[in-house]
Image (cartoon, rainbow, N blue to C red):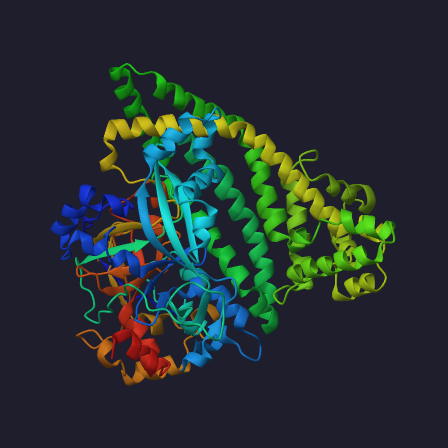
Amino acid sequence: MRRLILGIVSACLALPAFADEGMWLLPLLKQQKYMEMRQMGLQMAADDIYNPAGVSLKDAVVRFGGGCTGEVVSADGLVLTNHHCGYGYIQRHSSVEHDYLTDGFWAMSREEELPNPGLTVTFIEKIEDVTDYVMKALEKEKDQTLFSSSSYLNKLAVKRAGGERELKKHPGMAVEIRAFYDGNKYYMFTKKIYSDIRLVGAPPSSIGKFGADTDNWMWPRHTGDFSIFRIYADKNGEPAPYSKDNVPLRPKRWLKVSTDGVKADDYAMIIGFPGRTNKYYTSWEVAERRDIENTVRIHVRELRQEAMLEEMLKDDKVRIQYASKYAGSTNSYKSSIGSNWAINKRNFEQVKREEQEKLLAWAKQKGDPAYAEALAQLERIVKEREAFRFRSMMLSEALERSIEFSRVPTDTEALIKALNDKDEKKTAELMAELEKGYLRFANKDYAPAVDKKISKIILKDYLEQVKAGSRPAYLEVIDKDFGGNVDRFVDHLFETSIFGSNGNFNQFKANPSADRLANDPMILFAQSVKAEKKALNESLSGFNNAYDQARRVYMRGVLEMNGELNLSPDANSTMRITYGQVKGYSPRDCDFYGHQTTLDGVMEKEDPDNWEFVVPERLKALYEAKDFGRYALPDGRMPVAFCATTHTTGGNSGSPVMNAKGELIGINFDRNWEGVGGDIEYLPDYQRSIIVDIRYVLFVIDKYAGATSIINELLGE
């Protein structure tokens, strides 16, 4: 049964945290933070962390997929990341017969490693300040809104790299220019992207996802959140599509794994790809984030997840099909709850008002009205776009994300014409394309019964939340033809649409009809949702140019007032470094959470009747025998996780946590509840990164899985 957690001890004294705010750009390390890092305990030269002319720690850190971080940890391209980062790929390899989500997966030889189509690992080859280059290019443009256009900036990047033809000479190479400080600074990133990435190992979800939704965003934590992949390349070490002839990558740099462990106040640093922060929000943007973005997401996802989980718990096949979808949904759901809690509890609106007043006073003394004008513009725009933002968020969360049949193929005009023209050759070609689109939608992870159940619940709520005249036009048929009965409407869609079932599609395939295709209710529904999205985007785009310009001016003032080198830019999925200390914290008066959790806490939380807290029998046996090997603490307990004052956010999942020597001591996987608001306002006394201890990772691989070859590779033995 779940009991109290060992990591919590009473303490009527709140201890101060020695932490550094910010996600810092590596090229500015020497100018900005290196000396402070040394004072905190760093034992490395700056060039060993980032060296534009040589090999450094930077070269061992990769972007994993589209939204996580990973680290190279062996001479043969082994990569560690989080279990939740690899979860979708583990799920795709899983079936009722081979349930790797439940049982885990371990490749005991290279031949057993599993390929993952669509998964990439990205190395950053070069980071270059191109502010002058971009500013000079913008001076020649009539359209001054291009400063925030990603397509325009990437055209400049390709041009600077020598053009498309030059890039194609280098397999896997890509370039991009990203804006920082709302378009006041620009950096160009040269990347090398590998696409043959194979699954090597993953613990069962009862270890890798232990605590699941209940413990998500919480400390103390007891999750072994890791998975293992390997990068493959051609015989020359260059990126190449999957091939049995590919070989493990020989990387320029990999991290040494340390088994020395951590203690309170130890130096810790993280390199990764944090996704998005909004630390320079105005007070009006804080309110908009809380009242629209977060509130809508919380409301809709709660409805969706409850229905999804009911079906997952009934059927193992559905559980596997929807495991990744459910995990992704709940993560942002709980984060949004935490964000709103922080905004209200820590009074972020008032904090931002005070920052605005400080800027206005400085600007007035300087005699520059531009910053007051920019703030007034931002206030006006945020208020004027409120209704459109709400409608857009409801459409996105309710109809696009929650209703899977909103993603059926909709580009059917050419096929309708071919059928009407009785053009058999063209019809055959376009029918093949339609079938491909159908199979992408109705793939192995789609269950029509689940989609139908969720759709009924979500549509009823959507009609209550969004007034008539502000919805996709096709929804009018619910009142017109079905007397307002959403259940009948959804049943009709699944019964009559060619995409409603495999039987329906096969029937249409055998006897295609232009009339049936033109009047298909799922297609009409999806087309209407797309049309409404387009209309809302056009309405919102009317605000965007003025908004972006005002943000740019406002941010210029913030930089001038504070000094650019004293501020880190908001996260934008580019490589950053953050540093701090291994340290617990006091969430409230008379409570103190320690920095380290152990396997004792896993056993205390065990609940065999709750899927979130099931403990594998083998793990229990190892615990009872105290068979922890060389990975135990000096007092004999088995470490599981620790927390540190490093400043992280989404995208840092899987990031390497390193000690003062640059050795791997853990893998970042979450933040604590009290620190979720750090995306808007950093709270040094509360904000903590949650990290799986590398000793627990090694223990699970070695003692639990018996994967000796992986352990030997990780430890260089």
Question: x and y percent of residue 171 in the render?
Answer: 44, 58
Position of residue 612 relative to residue 351, above or below, is: below
Location of residue 463 (image quadrant)? top right
Depth check: give the residue in front, 595 or 73: 73
Instruction: Tell me if 343 is positioned left or right of 359 in this view.
Output: right
* Residue for point 67% across, 43% down: 529
* Residue for point 44% across, 55% down: 169
Question: x and y percent of residue 541 in the render?
Answer: 55, 31
Q: Is residue 583 in view from this perspective? A: no
Q: Is residue 696 in view from this perspective? A: yes
- Label tally: 0
Question: x and y percent of residue 181 in the render?
Answer: 35, 35
Instruction: Tell me if 338 is positioned left or right of 478 in this view.
Output: left
Residue that protrudes farthest toward the top in the picture = 367
Position of residue 556 relative to residue 372, above or below, is: below
* Residue for point 45% across, 70% down: 198
Question: x and y percent of residue 210 in the render?
Answer: 41, 68
* Image quadrant occupied by the C terminus: bottom left
Depth check: give the residue in front, 701 or 634: 701
* Image quadrant occupied by the N terminus: bottom left
Instruction: Tell me if 558 is positioned left or right of 164 in this view.
Output: left
Residue that protrudes farthest toward the left in the picture = 39
* Residue for point 38% across, 83% down: 618
